[in-house]
Image: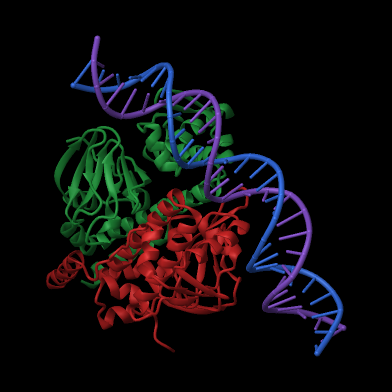
Chain colours: A red, B green, C purple, D blue
Amino acid sequence: MRDLPLHRLNHFVRLEPTEVKAFTELRTERRRFDRHDFIRRHGEPARDVYFLVEGWAACCVHSAGGDEQIVKVHLPGDLLGTPSMTLGCAAETLFALNRVVLDVVSGERFAEMFVKFPRLAAAMFLSAQQERIWLMDRLMSVGRTSSVQRLAGFLLSIYDRLRMIDPSHAPRFELPLSQREIANVLGITPVHANRTVGGLDDTGLVERDGRWVTLLDVKALREFSSIPERRFEGAPAWMRAVGEAAREQQRVD
Amino acid sequence: MRDLPLHRLNHFVRLEPTEVKAFTELRTERRRFDRHDFIRRHGEPARDVYFLVEGWAACCVHSAGGDEQIVKVHLPGDLLGTPSMTLGCAAETLFALNRVVLDVVSGERFAEMFVKFPRLAAAMFLSAQQERIWLMDRLMSVGRTSSVQRLAGFLLSIYDRLRMIDPSHAPRFELPLSQREIANVLGITPVHANRTVGGLDDTGLVERDGRWVTLLDVKALREFSSIPERRFEGAPAWMRAVGEAAREQQRVD
DNA sequence: CGGAAATTTGAAATCGCTCAATGATAGTGG
DNA sequence: CCACTATCATTGAGCGATTTCAAATTTCCG
């Protein structure tokens, strides 16, 4: 089995081998999906969550009228479906954007982990807060900026996250979204998504070649998008306090 | 000292007295604010979080251009500022919408709690996931619905949360937001917020009297808003598993 | 009472949507 | 390999929602 993409957990905690092992053992079943396959549909029971090993997945919410809004594009290393742990049935529909490999994580084992590996639990908590930051930024982008700016911001958010996986990642990637799906991310119609893509071309900040996207001037693009850059602290002071408390706990035991 | 509003924590966990006590002791300093006072501004260091005891507070994100988007209206019982625990400096600006009383919770004590009171930690985790659901729904609303529908959805979200605090709450409340602030919630301009408020009046689903709002037909209003209603499970199966693991842990100790 | 902020209204401009049609591309089965 | 089909990308034209600019009115607060 190839290595799991644990960069997200490792970012807030310097994982101990026992913790890596504990996380590895949370996983029960491995599943594969093709592009556009549903991983889980909204309304279905939401007992488990999913660890994305390979490929990209979309998380979308539906209006009563049937419209859909993609609220997150997940990359390898993300934990999918956790928001619906609070609900009886899933709020979000998860589907594969390209070929996906993921591991099912049972809710029960996840709960046990929370007690036995508090540093892992803290990492999960911080990861959820990080997702809130991203959602808040996206809400600001959709609420307050033009469609071209939103597209710029979206491409940057993907690029930033690719660099969190691999800091040396070039500002160039294949975007496995149709214009219809891009429209569902940006909160516009597919027709307007087409004109928006053209509009971004016209800025000269981005180059397109089929589904491949090259960010020609990241700094200027970020300024144009008007979304502030976020610097997530690796292993912050907060996390050290968890470590100390955990050691304390062991001494007491 | 009057009782703390612990309904949010109690929703996912049936808190033990020791856990209530532990949470109570997280708090260090009590602070008061008047309407429009800043609780914390974006860019400031983000070490602590805040437990809202009384009053309403807004959480907003700024674009590089200086526009602001209110991403959350906080009610008593909410924990404010947690997303920025992942950052060196705060992403969100927090300010009081009316007279506010809150308790400062130091990041360090919060971290210790995570290790010593895993059920409390699990409740915090689920609470963060709940916030993600709300943000996702709001993003869908702003991305995919008209300004009048967004306003309907926003009022409903407030009403639903007032009922989580007090299930017998009538569909009537004082909304301490100016039209400028409503515009910042809905992602529109203040001028259009005015016409939007008028537009909602015209539906006959809502009645206004100054800042007091009465939802005349909650069911029809929800349908109109096209935002699905979310049923958050109190003390779900997941949470019971945490409890069992905690007891197991004690036996091992 | 005076001044600042909030609400309300009007009119013109802009952005994004809808409807409609045309090519381009990719997958499928014969 | 080709015909067939469905999806995707692209473009045009008109419409509608929202913005912008500007001004009048009301409310709130000291």
Determine if residue A162 is in view: yes
- Front-most of residues A102 and B252: A102
Q: How many numbered markers are drawn?
A: 0
Q: Which quadrant: the N terminus of chain B?
A: top left
Residue A91 on image: x %, y %: 51, 56
At 18% across and 37% down in the image, what residue appears?
B32
At 25% across and 80% down in the image, what residue appears?
A16
At 40% across and 59% down in the image, what residue appears?
A224
Residue C12 lies left or right of residue B209; in this view the side is: right
Determine if residue A49 is in view: no
Quadrant housing residue A34? bottom right
- In the figure, B73 relative to A149: above or below? above
Residue A23 lies left or right of residue B1; in this view the side is: right
- Front-most of residues B237 and A137: A137
- Front-most of residues B19 and B114: B114
Residue B71 on image: x %, y %: 38, 48
Residue B19 on image: x %, y %: 23, 53
Residue B94 lies left or right of residue A131; in this view the side is: left
Quadrant housing residue C25? bottom right
